[in-house]
Image (tube, rainbow, N blue to C red):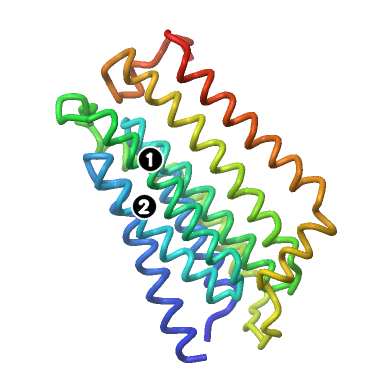
Amino acid sequence: MIANTIFFWIFSLIAVISALFMITRKHPLSSALCLVITFIALSGLYGLLSAKLLFVIQILVYAGAIMSLIIFSIMLLNVKEENLPKEDNIKKRVIFSSLLLLPMFFIIYLSIELYETYYFQDISSDFGSIKSLGLFLFTKYTLPFEIVSILLLIALLGVVVLAKRKI
Amino acid sequence: MISTQDYLIVSAILFFIGVLGVLTRKNLFIIFMSIELMLNSVNLTFVTFSRFFEDLTGQAIVFLVIAVAAAEAAIGLSIVILIFKNKESLNIDDFNIMKG
């Protein structure tokens, strides 16, 4: 239990701090690398919540595939300093949007705090494992699973069409 | 001791960091990555509630959301690359063809 607490604080602090770094960096490449750290910390949080398959999937798909795709395309475009947009009055916009967002965050914080406090009980080691989640996906959620495969096929075709066309 | 609320608060903080990134930055790539961050924070909420109710539905939904996010990233990045090749710029204020 003590180890759980310590790891929760480590992972959530890493996630929040590197997410803050992500939105403040000037060059998109450094913010993409900060986002990779956020995703790895989030996968640690999934592991603490005993979602073992999602822990692996998050590292493989998000931190591995999607982020390397983003980093690859930033490198492919060869973004230079002069291509980056000038963000001169950023302080004004940060203050304005914080004023806009703080009431919403306060409402969500209050509604979370009003929720009943629940400390996690011990759970069987089968919960969230590859076998149980796979069985669950292929029995109860077969139709959404197949529809997602069609969606991925459409995305594949769409990328090919977009890449071939000259605009 | 860590309760459900701590996970939910971390997820809310990450979501609002993502919204702040979308509202304040002008760089196309950083807005795109902020959207990815918001998707991930919602995933954390789903996994927390799945552990809370000891029900695998939340994790199944996260599985599907990750697949949808992968498709979205592929399409979005190809659009970004085409836009950059056309306009030589990453500033979203330059992309006002639709007059939105």
Residue situated furthest right in the rendering: A139
Q: Residues within 10 Å of mark 2 (few under 14, many from 20)?
A: many
Q: Name the residue located 74 percent from the left edge and 72 percent from the top edge.
A: B53
Q: Is residue A138 left or right of residue B90?
A: right
**Earlier sequence position, callout 1 versus callout 2:** 2
Label 2 secondary element: helix
Which chain letter goes with mark 1?
Answer: A
In the rendered image, residue B25, in percent from the top left (x then y), is placed at 32, 35
Q: Name the residue located 66 percent from the left edge and 69 percent from the top edge.
A: A130
Total number of numbered discs in the rendering: 2
Residue A35, numbered label? 2
Q: Name the residue located 43 percent from the left edge and 31 percent from the top edge.
A: B77
Residue A70, numbered label? 1
Callouts 1 and 2 in the same chain: yes
Q: Is residue A41 left or right of residue A75?
A: right
Which chain letter goes with mark 2?
Answer: A
Q: Nearer the viewer, residue B17 or A14?
A: A14
C-alpha distance separating marks 1 and 2 = 11 Å
In the rendered image, residue B22, in percent from the top left (x then y), is placed at 41, 38
| Label pair 1/2, CB-CB below 8 angstroms | yes
- B35 in relation to B9, above or below: above
- Indicate which label's residue lies in the foreground, 1 or 2: 1
Q: Nearer the viewer, residue B21 or A27?
A: A27
Disc 2 residue type (three-letter): Leu
Residue A29, numbered label? none
Residue situated furthest left in the rendering: A81
In the rendered image, residue B21, in percent from the top left (x then y), is placed at 38, 42
Disc 1 residue type (three-letter): Ile
Label 1 secondary element: helix
Q: Name the residue located 35 percent from the left edge and 35 percent from the top edge.
A: B29
- A64 in relation to A14, above or below: above
